[in-house]
Amino acid sequence: MLDSAFISYVTVMSITPGPNNLLLASSGVNFGLRRTLPMMFGISLGCATQLALTTLLLALILNWADTIRFPLAVMGCAYLLWLSWKLFKAASPDAKQQARPMRFIGGALFQAVNPKAWLMAINVAILFTPHEGATLHQTLLTIASFTAVNIPCILIWALMGDRLRHALRVTWKLRLFNGVMAGLMATTALWLLFDEWRALMA
């Protein structure tokens, strides 16, 4: 399963900016790497679970895709906008004791409404599942391979946030960073929603 096409696709999809990586970088800045790790592993587990379901139920999911795609996009984008607002209003360094990062379960469950994660899972299932369908053994091998590539990619974003943390100890700098990340996440959500709406209207 660890062929070059698979590694390239999962690496590009895992390491490029998206809701998960923006959240990981922001959590790294606001809470440090150690407190961000549960969310990071939750994100990877959520993506692996999506991939397992998509690989095993590919035909059914493709039949449902047109029906559930737009409602899922609306829910996901609404949640991203809410997270953007929470990030924009994030506490200053002096009041961090009251704030806490997303936990393991939250990171896993977030994938259910993350449009980029669904796109990645569906594409991996379509591109790298045998035409006759995947056996349980093949599905487990795909998940293990995916996780082996995904975790180092998303860890980079959490580490980047953790390293930036020391440079952003000044309140105005942290607020500026959180504002920029919130703006990027809100822009991502609105762009995804517009793209889905345009596809629905076509």
Image: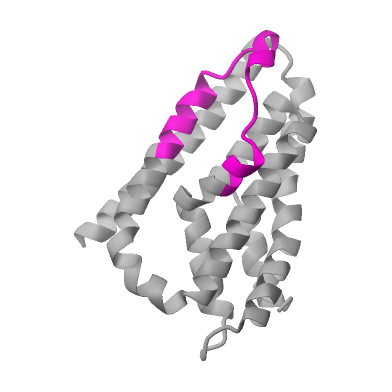
Residue 102 colored in magenta in the image: yes
Residue at point 69%, 58% (across, down) = 150
Instruction: Identify which residue is drawn at 68% across, 73% down.
Output: 140
Question: Picture coordinates of residue 41 (x, y %)?
Answer: 70, 48
Q: How many marks?
A: 0
Q: Is residue 152 magenta?
A: no
What's the colour scheme? one colour
- Give residue 104's position: percent from left, percent from top: 66, 42
The C terminus, quarter of image: bottom left
Give the percent coordinates (x, y) of residue 58.
46, 76
* Span of residues in magenta: 79-108
Front-most of 94 and 110?
Answer: 110
Q: Residue at x 37, y 38 (%)?
A: 78
- Can you say whether 34 is above or below 114 in the image? above
- The answer to whether residue 195 is seen in the rendering is no
Dominant secondary structure of the residues highlighted in magenta in the image:
helix
| Residue 77 position within the rendered picture, expressed as x and y whole percent measured from the top left | 39, 42
Q: Is residue 8 left or right of residue 73?
A: right
Tell me: residue 127, above or below residue 100.
below
